[in-house]
Amino acid sequence: MTVETSRYADFESLQKQAVALRREGLSLRQIRDHLKVYNNDLLHRLVKGEPPPEWTKRPNAKDDLRARARELRLQGWTYDQIQAELGCSKSSISLWVRDLPKPEPRYTPEEQRALMREGLAQRHLARRDEYEAAREAAKAEIREMTDKELLIAGVALYWAEGAKSKPYSRRERVVFINSDPRVILTFLAWLQLLDVAEERISFRLMIHESADVRGTEQYWADLVGVGIDQLKRTTLKKHNPLTTRKNTGETYRGCLVVDVAKSAELYHQIEGWWNGIVAQAKTRLR
C-alpha cells in the first residue's frame, strides 16, 4: 500500500467515525477530543455535509422579533408602526416580511389627510404650550429694571425703529414710529427717564383709509393717556386694490408716530449712546 493510499484510507476511516459521532449528536469539540483531531480544517472536512445537532445551535436574538414583525405585518401594520412597536430598523423589517402580501391601506386618502391635520394641530398645541412656558420663564428673569438698563434698552430700541439722520437727508429730530403698543409704552417710559417734558411730545396716527380710523384714534389716545383731540391730524394711506394686505381685521391699528419737539441735542445723545454700546459690544467679540 502506497503512502498516498494509506493517507486516503486513514481519512476515510476518520470520516466514517466523525460522521457517526456527528449523527449521534456530538459537537465538533466532542468529536475533536474523541478522535484526537486538532486541525480545525481537517475536522470540518470530516463532517462536511452533516448538519450540526439542534442543541449546538445558538439561539438567534432576533428570531422572536422576526416572528412578531411578521405577525404584525399580517395584521396590516406599516413598516413605521412595526418599527415604533419593536424598536428595530426598517431594513430588518423589510427582509423579514418581504414575502408577505402588502396590507390594504387602513385609511382612505381623505382620512389620512384628516389624521395628518389632526396630528399637526396637536403638535402645534403642544409647542404653543412649550413656547408659552418658555416666554413666562424668560419674563421672570427680567425683574426690577435699573435706570441704566432702561436707558440702554431705549437707545437700542430707537436705533432699530426710530428715524435717523442720513448724509443725504439731515433730520436731527427724535421721531419714533411703531405699530406695537408695548413698544410704544416702553419708548414713552424711556423718554420719561430722560426727563423729556410731556408738552414736547406729540402723537399722530398713520393708518390705511379702509380701517376704522376713529376707533383706532381712540385706542391710541387711551393707550398713551391723551385726549383724542390732542392727536395730530391722522395720515391716511390710500388702499391699492392690486395688492393683497395682510394687516387687516380688528387687530390692525396702524402705526403711532411719536414726535419730540426741539430734540436735536437729544438725537445726538442717542447716537453717542449707541456708539458707546457698539464699542463695548465689540470688546466682547471672540
Image (cartoon, helix red, strand yellow):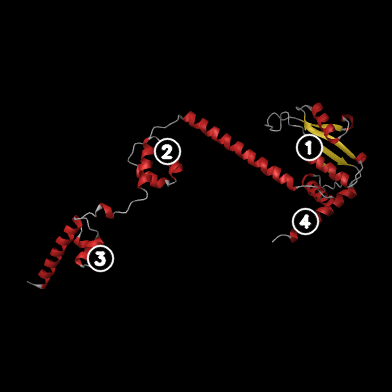
Residue 74: horizontal and vertical position, in percent?
Answer: 36, 36
Alpha-carbon span between mark 1 and mark 3 = 86 Å
Amino acid carrying mark 1 in the image: Pro
* Horizontal relation, residue 251 to residue 9: left or right: right
Q: Badge 1 is on which residue?
A: 181
Q: Which of marks 1 and 2 is nearer the N terminus?
A: 2
Which one is closest to the eye, mark 3 or mark 4?
3
Residue at 84%, 54% (x, y): give it.
272
In this rendering, does residue 255 appear at all?
yes
Q: Which of marks 3 and 2 is nearer the N terminus?
A: 3
Residue at 81%, 40% (x, y): give it.
185
Alpha-carbon span between mark 4 and mark 2 = 57 Å
Q: Badge 2 is on which residue?
A: 78
Q: Is mark 1 on a helix, strand or loop?
A: helix
Pick the front one: 33 or 38: 33
In the figure, 76 relative to 12: above or below? Answer: above
Q: Badge 4 is on which residue?
A: 278
Amino acid carrying mark 4 in the image: Val
